[in-house]
Image (tube, grey):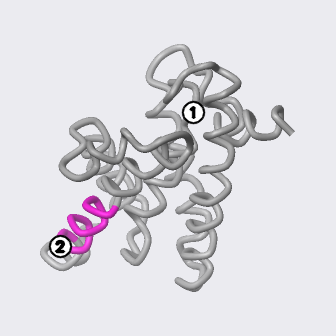
Amino acid sequence: MTRLAVLVATAGGLGHAPVAPGTFGSAAGVAIYLLMAKSPVAWQVAVALVVVVVGTWASSQAAHFYSRDDPSQVVVDEVAGQLVTLIFTGVGLAGAAVGFLVFRVLDIVKPWPANRFESLHGGVGIMADDVMAALYGNIIMQVLVRVLPGWL
């Protein structure tokens, strides 16, 4: 079971990238979004929820496996964050690229209260700060879609 958890937490091994593993995790989230962009919103919400719930479990297991609170190899939180950033936007490739940048900046800056969620224990803390940053990202994307219709 630990092997499965680490596989999920590292997004199929992307978390082992030698440079910027979080960026690779975010890219996986964009790819998943683009694959389901034309799907009903309910399906997109379901996929995002599954990634968050399963990712929380997997992150907890991986943190124990790597003996660290928030191992850099764990990137399922970036996958979830990207999905939450892009959900309900209906954007295509260009908009997904903008959403990628928006989320990466917010994930690094961690505006309040996202920065406070990092202190939560286990997988909840690993996932919660990224999901909170992604909620901010989604708000930004909603504004951009309305301000720049047709561009994204």
Q: Position of residue 110 (x, y in %)?
A: 25, 43
State which region is magenta: 135-144
User: Residue 20, relative to residue 86: is it above or below?
Assistant: above
Of 121 and 94, the residue lying toward us = 121
Outermost residue toward the top? Answer: 18
The residue that appears at 17% across and 73% down in the rendered structure is 143
What's the amino acid at mark 2? Val
- Quarter of the image where the C terminus is located: bottom left
The residue drawn where x is 49% and y is 41% is 121
Residue 147 spot, x, y in % from top left: 12, 75
Q: Which mark is residue 4?
A: none
- The answer to whether 47 appears left or right of 143 in the picture is right
Number of marks in picture = 2
Q: What residue would you read off at disc 1?
A: 74
* Quadrant of residue 132 within the rendered picture: bottom left
Mark 2, Cα crowd under 10 Å, few <14 / some 14-19 / many 20+, is: few
| Magenta span contains residue 137 | yes
Label 1 secondary element: loop
Between residue 99 and residue 123, name the one nearer to us: 123
The residue at the point 75 percent across, 40 percent down is: 5
Identity of the residue furthest to the front in this view? 121
The residue singled out by tag 2 in the image is 143
**Along the horizontal axis of the image, is 134 left or right of 27?**
left
Amino acid at pointer 1: Val
Which quadrant is home to the N terminus?
A: top right
Tell me how far mark 2 sits from mark 1, CA to CA. 30 Å
Determine the image quadrant of residue 40. bottom right
Residue located at (63% from left, 68% from top): 47
Disc on the earlier residue, 2 or 1? 1
Q: Is residue 13 above or below residue 92?
A: above
Task: Return the x and y of residue 74 as percentages of the image width and height.
Answer: 57, 33
- Residue 126 horizontal/vertical position (percent): 48, 41
